[in-house]
């Protein structure tokens, strides 16, 4: 798991006590690509290794988020 990744999204499967993210890795992207499904071959040519720029932190999102069931 990535060390030192703090997250407040407590309804995520990977969230742990102390606001610790317990995912092995996370994928963060810009909000503009928030609906991209990287597991799909129809991801619009975007892969997890593409690059973007964000003007501020509020325009970024975690794609690894998975709601608890
Ligand atoms: S996967 Fe993303 S949303 Fe889920 S706990 Fe980790 S950083 Fe937060």
Image (cartoon, rainbow, N blue to C red):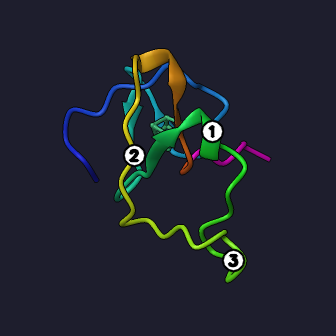
Q: Residue 31: percent from the left, percent from the top?
A: 60, 34
- Disc on the earlier residue, 3 or 1: 1
User: Mark 3 near mark 1, Cβ–Cβ under 8 Å?
Assistant: no
Q: Which residues are magenta?
A: 65-69
User: Mark 1 near mark 2, Cβ–Cβ under 8 Å?
Assistant: yes
Q: Residue 7: percent from the left, percent from the top?
A: 43, 25
Q: Where, by quadrant of the figure, is residue 46 drawn?
A: bottom right
Q: Nearer the viewer, residue 38 or 68?
A: 38
Q: Nearer the viewer, mark 2 or mark 3?
A: 2
> Mark 3 — residue?
40
Q: Is residue 36 left or right of residue 3?
A: right
Q: Nearer the viewer, mark 3 or mark 1?
A: 1
Q: Where, by quadrant of the figure, is residue 34 drawn?
A: top right
- Neighbourhood count class around disc 2 (C-alpha, 10 Å): few under 14, some 14–19, many 20 upward: few
Which residue sits at x=34%, y=26%?
A: 6
Q: CA distance from mark 3 to mark 1?
A: 17 Å
Q: CA distance from mark 2 to mark 3?
A: 19 Å
> Mark 2 — residue?
52
**Dot 3: element:** loop
**Dot 1: element:** helix
> Mark 1 — residue?
32
- Neighbourhood count class around disc 1 (C-alpha, 10 Å): few under 14, some 14–19, many 20 upward: few
Classified by dominant secondary structure, the portion drawn in magenta counts as loop
Q: Is residue 15 left or right of residue 41?
A: left
Q: Nearer the viewer, residue 5 or 19?
A: 5
Task: Answer above or below: position of 29 versus 37.
Answer: above
- Disc on the earlier residue, 1 or 2: 1
């Amino acid at each position: 798991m990535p060390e030192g990744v703090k997250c407040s999204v407590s309804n995520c499967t990977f969230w742990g006590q102390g606001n610790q993210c317990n995912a092995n890795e996370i994928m963060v992207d810009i909000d503009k690509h928030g609906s991209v499904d990287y597991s799909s071959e129809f991801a619009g040519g975007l892969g997890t290794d593409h690059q973007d720029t964000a003007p501020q932190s509020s325009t970024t999102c975690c794609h690894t988020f998975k709601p608890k069931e």
